[in-house]
Amino acid sequence: MKRVQLLSPVTGTIMPLSEVQDPVFSQGMMGEGLGVAPTNGQIVAPAAGKVTMVAATLHAIGFTTAAGLEILVHLGIDTVELKDKPPFKLTIKVGDEVNAGDEIGQMDLAAIVAAGKRTTVIMAVTNSGETVASLTAKVGPIKAGDVGANVEVKDSVTEPTTVAAKPASTGGGKYDQLATQIIENVGGAGNVKSVIHCITRVRFYLKDDGKANDDTIRNLKGVIDIAKAGGQYQVVIGPAVTDVYDAVVKQLGPGFGDDDASAIASEKEANKAAWKKMTPWQKVKHSFSALIGVITGSMIPVIGLLAASGILKGILSLLTYYKVVSTAAPTYVIINAMGDSVFYFLPIFVGFTAAKKLGSDPVIMGIVGGVLTYPTIVSIAATGKVTSHLLGMGINANFFGLPVHVASYTYSIFPMIAGAWLASKLEPWLKRVIPTVLRMIFVPLFEVVLISGAILLFLGPIITAFSGALAAGIVKVYQLSPAISGLIIGGFYQVLVIFGLHWAIIPIVANDIATTGHSYLNAIVSATMVAQGGAVLAIAMKSKVASIKELAWPATISAFSGVTEPAMYGINLKYGRAFVTASIGGAVGGFLTGLMHVNMWGFAGSLIGFASFVSPHGIDFSFWGFWIASIADIIVSFTLTYMFGFSDADVKNVKTAPKKKHLGEQAA
């Protein structure tokens, strides 16, 4: 039996094919192979042979070797959608002969990530059934051009087959018949607006998805599966996709094979059609799901920064507690700025990312975020004299004589997401009514003024009033029963964090510490942080998906350092059940904290803040109660999450790029 060595096409970390986040590849539908998480954009030929295919979008390359292996190198996941600005540069074309390890191009990893796509490079032997006896991938770090897999070639393979020759050998008739059946069951030619294809799927833009007969198409001979995403009705074919696509276009006629079809417009049309068919309860669920999707999508680009900053802030807390660094020293100021800036200026970052998610101008929303964090605005919120009260809010400013409450919006996200949504509605209207020659100046002008004004004068005060009422309610519950309040606050406090409403609790905590030197309420809040850390720790240990582990471990450290946003937005909230199991753990920890009357003498919470539970008079039961509640927190949230809150199958249901997709919709 002949052995062939396949080289890694890129530098990075090799993973088993089963861990690749595209079910068509991970389930072996395209043959045996491997995935590589790249760290460098250089691409090399995995074997000596002939280039038999280069995708029009440059995201996939086919080779045929002298041993008869047909090798597909797929650059990134879902990158076929980047056809307008392909992040690839290739130096080869169909028909070229290459040597193993020859540099054949570059991929722009940063551009792929910025577009919300995965950079994973997939290498698969598409004719594995006829040629491969076994394929062993060398999992772990690898350099481009080093041996990435050993392939045992079947003895029956005597001569190479080519990708180009394969369709001819099977005959075009069956593809014509399959194309007819597919067109018939997507609602007929009259229901098709346009059609494109990638390496594995024929992608239809339909006028009405509801007319498609999913089950019939899924069971057609030659169809692997169907998927719906980005306004597309995707029919998964596999290696014969180009043949089926050609047959479909031939039957539909000229003009249907539109590679420039707008996925965004199609998605909006599909969403409108789906909305009309929903029941009221389905609309509520869809709206809540969409809201969570916007929040997590807006936060995902800054998750890494939040995690790093959380760890840095935790380290600084330890340095100050052990008197290595004084809070009055310039060293403290500099390190604190490094750790705190991403939180302080969060409205700017969230304005930018939320705008990209919702379709408004990111730069304009970034400027609006700058307005909210402008030093003078922050100063008014902090030191402005309260002249009167309205709806429970102190009036500390006026705008053209109109009394307003200016709140502090540093650290906040929800006002900016609401502003980005308003901008997505306002911007198209402005572009319709303002002449083209004036748009460059007047669209940003009106948008900044109107959106900033809406947040400062209306949205912000409304959120502040709601936050104040919520905080007052929490205090009442705590006064009624510390144990009950611990249960309720522990279970729901991190929900407040999602919407930025948790800052209503901070003044209460600050006032407690300023007047009494301690805060029972902050001790309960600390328990919720530990619970989020316990849940994401379970995911870090359970998951076999490299991208999940890479995010979960630093998010765990950050949560145990008192910053839960990376754990929530990056992992727990995103996968739904994990957030629920974490909240149950928080409820248990909060209940025990309240029951044992655990007290806290500082701001720093979670495990890193253990020193805050040491009384000025020495260690008392609050210190031990903190550890009892924290350990219970971790045990409950970790166990529930590990058993019920997460599985790697959930990863297939959620895409961390701009659009939310269902199972199997990571496109090849």
Image (spheres, rainbow, N blue to C red):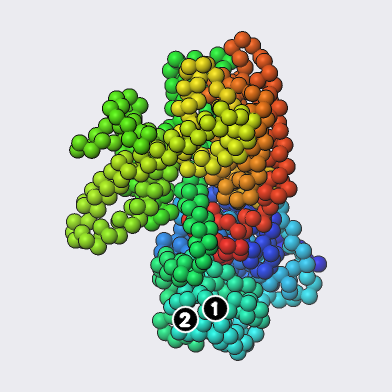
| Quarter containing the C terminus | bottom right
In this view, 338 is above or below 288: above
Q: What residue type is labelled 1?
A: Ala
Label 1: few (<14), some (14–19) or many (≥20) C-alpha neighbours in 10 Å? some
- State the count of labels: 2
In this view, 515 is above or below 462: above
Q: Do the residues labelled 2 and 1 touch (CB within 8 Å)?
A: yes
Q: Name the residue under label 1.
A: 212
What's the residue at 68%, 72% (across, down)? 127
Q: Mark 2 points at which residue?
A: 191
Q: Which of 407 and 145 is in front in this view?
A: 407
Horizontal side of 319 relative to 540 (left or right) equals: left
What's the residue at 47%, 18% (across, down)? 514
Q: Position of residue 183 (x, y in %)?
A: 53, 83
Q: Which of 331 and 341 is in front in this view?
A: 341
Q: Can residue 504 be seen in this view?
A: yes
Outermost residue toward the top in this view: 617
| Quarter containing the N terminus | bottom right
Q: What residue type is labelled 2?
A: Asn
Mark 2 element type? helix
Q: Position of residue 521 (x, y in %)?
A: 56, 27
Q: Can residue 80 be seen in this view?
A: no
What's the residue at 62%, 58% (across, down)? 652
What's the residue at 46%, 58% (across, down)? 87
Q: Nearer the viewer, residue 345 or 466?
A: 466
